[in-house]
Image (cartoon, helix red, strand yellow):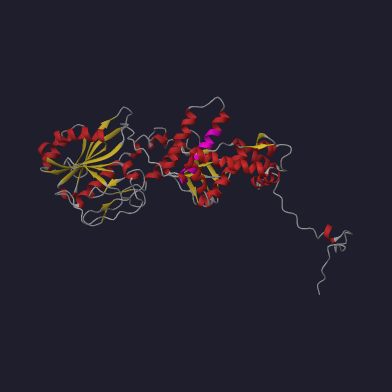
Amino acid sequence: MNYKVGRNDPCPCSSGRKYKHCCGQPAALAEPPPNSHDGAIELAVKWLAQHHRKAFSAALTETMEEVVFDIFDDEQEAIDALASIEGDLLQQLQINLTEWLLAAGDMQVKGEYQEISELLLGPRGPILTQGQRAWLQQLTEQALRLYDITQVLPGVGVTVCDALDAEKPPLTVVERSGSQTLKVGMQIGARVMRVGEQHQFSGAIYPFSIFSGRSVLADLQEIEDEPGPHPEDDAYSASFTLIADWLAQYLLPPPMPDFIDSHTGEPVLLTTDHYAVQDWDALSTRLAAQVDVEGDRVAGWSRLLDCEDGQTRPQASINPEAQGTRVGVFYKTAGLAEKGRTWFDAVAGDSVKFQLREVSDPKGMLSGSSGQEARMPSSQTLPAGMTPEIMAEAIESAIKSSYANWADEPIPVLQNRTPREAMQDAAGLSGSKVCYAATKTARPSSLRNKGVAGFLTSFSGTRSVCSADGRYFSHGSKALASRCNTNGSGNGTRMLA
């Protein structure tokens, strides 16, 4: 028979004290070591809820409203958007804004605004271990920055580079949970904290899509390029801008990127002129006579230009097409296409006969996308003499040519260096990895027959192409569809809407 000791009975350990004051006390909660920061955020939030519950709640609500109203120009749209935030997004927003308030926010206490961090770290704040106090202090000092993810070890950590400062060395961050979902090439907003000899994220993470990441990068760059008299105000503005741009991804339609050719400065307008070849020998001889043309009938030709920056770039790519009866001349911009058409017609002469021009506007194609794989109408027909196989080969050749000199093309995100140049230092190497991750899946896949009219190439990145009948295009992991406006002049020019 087991004897149960009463709370007011003498303690069986013979200490002479009552059981409830001795061995009958609840086990004390394990405290973190003095140098550990574990529980710092939780303890800070708990203290604020106990001592300034209404003030902190009001500050959180006010900050949330301020972020949403910063996104919208129309007041009613902002009100409607604010009401629509719920579920996981609301929870994540509250978590992120709570950390932001602890680091840089203020709240109204007894009629006066006070820095929340000063209340927490002041003499009347919560009882903190040395490590917890150091963590909250560091939270106020480490800026919320935009980072490129250049390496991921799932379950271990990630390597990141500052997206705004290519000269800063890469940082290896211990992140066991987030590294399970983060991918190379992504951009995130985060605070990177120093813990001993290691780095950790503070907790709040702001992931960006590839298009939104470029947009926030431009916004943050503008703040850095035009600094104000007070650096702390610039840091506040930058962090607030990053948060607003992150939330805007969920509340606004996705932004349409601008596609600009880095050399000419013109908008990218992928253009291919298709010709029927009347005399291959004559065409080969005439192209071989041009000092700025390299190549042959088997591999195709490139018209090259020696640029002032020391790079050699193709002005036009001349690609043999299906069954050896046709050739396609590819240009990246409208300006290059107009000049190139005049040049090629003069060089080729009567050895070729022009058939049609295919023009693809990447931005227009994205804005008209449906997000669903297009169903190809079987009743559509191609121009006379143009087969689906011929068109498919022309498309594939055009896409491949746009990647031919990728490693030697200056890229803005690499501070206008080429990937080959950037790889000479650690920061540039990490940046090149990001660029490579964004383009390695952008190679054309096998063209698939969808009936009389249907060939799609499906790829990710920033390039999109017409289908065989010029009415559809593909972009990203799923095929997207868009109508074409056919030029009524009968000259064979087709422009994607």
Screen quadrant of the N terminus? bottom right
* Residue furthest out toward the front: 76
Q: Nearer the viewer, residue 494 or 211?
A: 494
Q: Is residue 453 left or right of residue 3?
A: left
Give the percent coordinates (x, y) of residue 489: 17, 40
Identify the residue at horizontal 27%, vertical 47% (top origin): 483
Residue 302 visible in rendering: yes
Q: Nearer the viewer, residue 157 or 276?
A: 276
- The part of the image, by quadrant, that contains residue 434 is top left
* Residue furthest out toward the bottom: 1
Q: Nearer the viewer, residue 18 or 285?
A: 18
Give the percent coordinates (x, y) of residue 90: 54, 49
Q: Is residue 157 left or right of residue 442?
A: right
Residue 242: in magenta span: yes
Give the percent coordinates (x, y) of residue 199: 57, 42
Give the percent coordinates (x, y) of residue 474: 31, 49
On screen, residue 131 above or below 415: below
Residue 256: in magenta span: no
Residue 170 visible in rendering: no
Give the magenta-colored segment's residue range: 236-250
Report the number of discs. Answer: 0
